[in-house]
Structures are given as structure tokens and as C-alpha cells.
């Protein structure tokens, strides 16, 4: 189905059954048209958008002609989904979680091995096959307690083992990223901790390569001062090790460590400018509201109850044509994932209208 301009919402009867559940769960009937997972839509003027699940495939004429840029066609894909099995999913298996994520109109899900890797390889294959059938992009979070910079050889070996096993299961499932915590400071000097983290991250990456795992190792930007993992440190680590290691941009952690520094589009521009040396095609991001104190994360909060600005982030992604996977790690995980999807739809519509207005004004001036 195509929608020319800003026409009324799609008829509810043309929605798949999952939309009805989504509307019932969230009570957002007025947004029903935004979950057109099986439909296409055309927004005139500055872009053509085809929405599938929660992917925003934008064949951009963006930035618009009013900015003096020649139209250039490309596909922009933004995936959104929950971290772990959604809380409101009745079934608690990974396959249940993938199916429910799809029913919510989302198309990404991070598999949580946070407290241990308790999955058989055969079942991992089944989960991956189901995710592929439903077009749900999988990623994996390795066990939380890893420290690649520890003063204990046993801890380092255990951490590498956990990351490698997570990588194996991720590869079996067809996931594209394994997220790991790089480490925290112990009795060692900071510089020695850093050197160990670099060395052991490279070792884990090399094991991924030698095993032909088709998955990147992602190092998470951390939220507390006693941990290694500022944005600058993670970028430096990725630069030094090179291909196969990527930054995992936990924006709540960046916000906390900067004492509330993500409130405007310019704030997000500064963050992504630091990533430019890595020349990434797409970005893996976490988003949630956050409570913080003195440059440290205290706890996660729902997005709307925090001073972190998602709309500025969404507008930045769309205006700058940044492809990304955005994983909700909010306490109301799938609720905020759906909220982010809705906000991106609204922002896309607003940008389209603004582009149309700018072109009309320019045409009038030229006439």
C-alpha cells in the first residue's frame, strides 16, 4: 500500500493480527497506522519510505534540495527492539521472545546471556531460524561479569571463555554482534589495566576470526568511573585492534558520565564525531532513561522519566542518515522500544513536511 502525502491512517482491518495485540497492550490506538509492518508508504517531497517491521527504509532525497544538495538515493535502515525476552511476553523462551518481538512490530532482539550461557546448540539453531523467518535481527550480550583487565589470570581466562562461547552461540543463531563488558579497575595501575584489556580483546577477536564466526565483538561504553570504557577509550581500543571489534554505544552511559550531556542534536553530533575514525557503516546502540550522580550511572529509568533526549537522537539519525540498531534497555523494555519506533515515525514525518515547506519557500523566492 502507498500513501501519498500525509493521508489518514491505514484502515485497521488491513493490519496483521499482531497490531491488534499491540494496540491492546499499549492503548495507543491513535498510532495504529504507524505499525504498518507489511505495508509501504510514500511520503512526497524529500523521501520515499518503505516501512517493514520497524525498519525505516528511506530512499533519501535528503538533505533536501533547499540545502543545495543534489538528491541522492539510498536505503537507510534503523532497527529497534528489546534487550531480552519482552516483559509482557507470556512465554519465556527465546523463541517466544523472538515471536513476540515480531508481533509488536519490532525487528531486533538482543539475546541475554547476562547471567550465564544456558542454551543448547540445537535450540540456538532453532531460535536463529525462527528469527530469520520473521526478519528479526539478533544480537547477543555475553555474561555481565567479565574483566579483560583483571589482576587475576583465572578471571581473564574465564572472561575470554565467556565471550568466546557467546560468540559461538551468536554465530550459530546468525546474530551479528556479541556485546561484552571490557573490564574494571582492580589493584593494577590504570595503564596496565588498559594494556591488558587491549591485549585480551585482540585475543578474543582473533579467536572469532580463526573460528570463522560471522559476528563482530562489540565493546560497551560503560557508565561508572571505576570501569574501563569511556567513549574515548572504546574508540581507541577499536581503532588499535581494527576489523572485527566495534563500539557499543550505550547512550545512557554517555549521558551519565557527562552528567546529563545528551539533550540536543549537537550533543549527539559530538558523540558520533568521535566515532568517525572507525568509518562504520552502521551503529549498535543502547537507549534508556537513566538516573546518574557525579558522572556515574545509578539506575535505569523509563525514557520519558529521564532528562536524556531521545527525539534529538532520532532526528540526528534521520537527518544525518545514520544506519543503526537501537536496543531498548529500559525498565519497561518493550514499551520504550515501541515508544522509540513511534517517535521515529513522527520525526520522519516532521522532517518530510519541513523539507516540503523549505522547497516551496525556495521556489517562491526564485520565482
Image (spheres, rainbow, N blue to C red):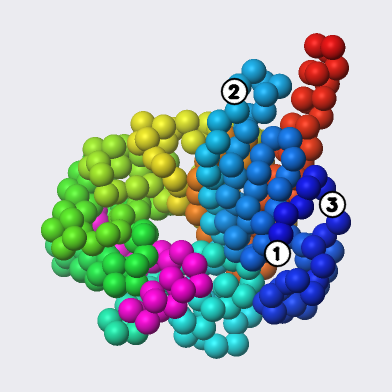
At x 64%, y 66%, the residue is 38
Tell me the SS state at disc 3: loop
Give left or right: position of 235 versus 15. Answer: left
* 40 is within the stretch colored magenta: no
**What is the spatial separation of the Cα atoms under label 2 and label 3, in whole angstroms?**
27 Å
Can you say whether 65 is above or below 224 in the image?
Answer: above
**What is the spatial separation of the Cα atoms under label 1 and label 2, in whole angstroms?**
31 Å
Give left or right: position of 75 versus 226. Answer: right
Could you say which is closer to the camera, residue 244 or residue 257? 244
If you read the primary sequence from the N terminus, does the residue marked by circle 1 or circle 2 appear first? 1
Residue 313 visible in the displayed image = no
Residue 311: x, y in percent?
69, 45
> Which quadrant would residue 150 be assigned to in this image?
bottom left
Could you say which is closer to the camera, residue 10 or residue 218? 10
Graded by Cα atoms within 10 Å as few (under 14), some (14 to 19) or many (20 or more), the crowding at tag 3 reads: few
> Which image quarter holds the N terminus?
bottom right
The residue tagged 3 is: 7
Instruction: Give the residue furthest to the front.
Output: 1
At x 53%, y 50%, the residue is 77
Graded by Cα atoms within 10 Å as few (under 14), some (14 to 19) or many (20 or more), the crowding at tag 1 reads: many
Q: Nearer the viewer, mark 3 or mark 1?
A: 3
Total marks in image: 3
> Which quadrant would residue 166 be assigned to in this image?
bottom left
Marks 3,1: beta carbons within 8 A: no
The residue tagged 1 is: 35
Highlighted range, magenta: 124-149
**What is the spatial separation of the Cα atoms under label 3 and label 1, in whole angstroms?**
15 Å
- Number of the label disc, if any, that sits on residue 70: 2
Residue 122: x, y in percent?
29, 84
At x 18%, y 60%, the residue is 212
If you read the primary sequence from the N terminus, does the residue marked by circle 2 or circle 3 appear first? 3
Can you say whether 117 is above or below 47 in the image?
Answer: below
Amino acid at each position: 500500500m502507498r500513501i501519498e502525502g500525509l493521508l489518514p491512517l491505514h484502515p485497521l482491518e488491513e493490519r496483521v493480527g499482531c497490531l491488534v495485540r499491540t494496540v491492546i497492550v499499549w492503548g495507543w490506538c491513535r498510532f495504529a497506522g504507524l505499525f504498518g509492518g507489511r505495508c509501504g508508504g510514500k511520503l512526497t517531497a524529500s523521501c520515499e519510505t518503505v516501512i517493514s517491521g520497524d525498519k525505516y527504509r528511506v530512499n533519501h532525497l535528503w538533505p533536501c534540495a533547499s540545502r543545495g544538495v543534489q538528491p541522492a538515493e539510498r536505503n537507510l535502515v534503523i532497527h529497534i527492539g528489546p534487550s531480552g525476552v519482552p516483559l509482557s511476553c507470556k512465554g519465556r523462551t527465546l523463541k517466544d521472545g523472538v515471536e513476540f518481538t515480531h508481533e509488536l512490530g519490532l525487528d531486533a532482539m538482543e539475546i541475554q546471556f547476562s547471567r550465564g550461557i544456558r542454551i543448547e546448540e540445537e535450540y540456538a539453531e532453532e531460535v536463529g531460524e525462527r528469527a530469520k523467518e520473521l526478519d528479526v535481527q539478533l544480537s547477543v550480550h555475553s555474561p555481565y561479569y567479565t574483566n579483560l583487565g583483571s589482576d587475576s589470570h583465572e578471571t581473564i581466562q574465564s572472561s575470554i571463555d565467556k565471550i568466546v562461547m557467546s560468540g559461538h552461540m551468536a554465530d550459530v543463531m546468525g546474530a551479528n554482534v556479541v556485546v561484552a563488558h571490557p573490564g574494571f579497575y582492580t589493584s593494577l595501575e590504570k595503564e596496565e589495566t588498559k594494556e591488558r584489556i587491549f591485549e585480551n580483546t585482540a585475543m578474543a577477536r582473533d579467536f572469532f576470526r580463526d573460528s570463522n564466526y560471522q559476528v563482530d565483538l562489540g565493546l560497551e561504553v560503560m557508565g561508572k568511573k571505576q570501569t574501563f570504557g569511556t567513549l574515548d577509550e572504546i574508540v581507541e581500543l577499536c581503532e588499535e585492534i581494527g576489523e572485527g571489534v566495534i563500539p557499543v554505544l550505550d547512550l545512557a552511559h554517555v549521558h551519565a558520565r557527562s552528567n546529563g550531556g545528551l539533550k540536543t542534536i549537537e550533543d549527539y553530533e559530538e558523540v558520533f564525531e568521535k566515532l568517525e575514525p572507525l568509518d562504520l557503516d552502521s551503529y549498535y546502540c543502547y537507549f534508556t532513561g537513566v538516573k546518574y550522580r557525579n558522572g556515574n550511572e545509578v539506575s535505569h529509568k523509563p525514557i520519558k522519566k529521564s532528562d536524556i533526549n531521545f527525539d534529538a537522537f532520532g532526528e540526528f539519525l534521520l537527518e544525518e542518515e545514520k544506519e543503526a540498531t537501537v536496543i531498548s534497555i529500559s525498565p519497561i523494555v518493550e514499551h520504550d522500544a515501541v515508544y522509540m519506533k513511534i517517535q521515529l515515525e513522527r520525526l520522519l514525518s516532521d522532517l518530510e513536511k519541513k523539507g516540503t515547506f523549505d522547497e516551496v519557500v525556495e521556489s517562491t523566492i526564485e520565482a
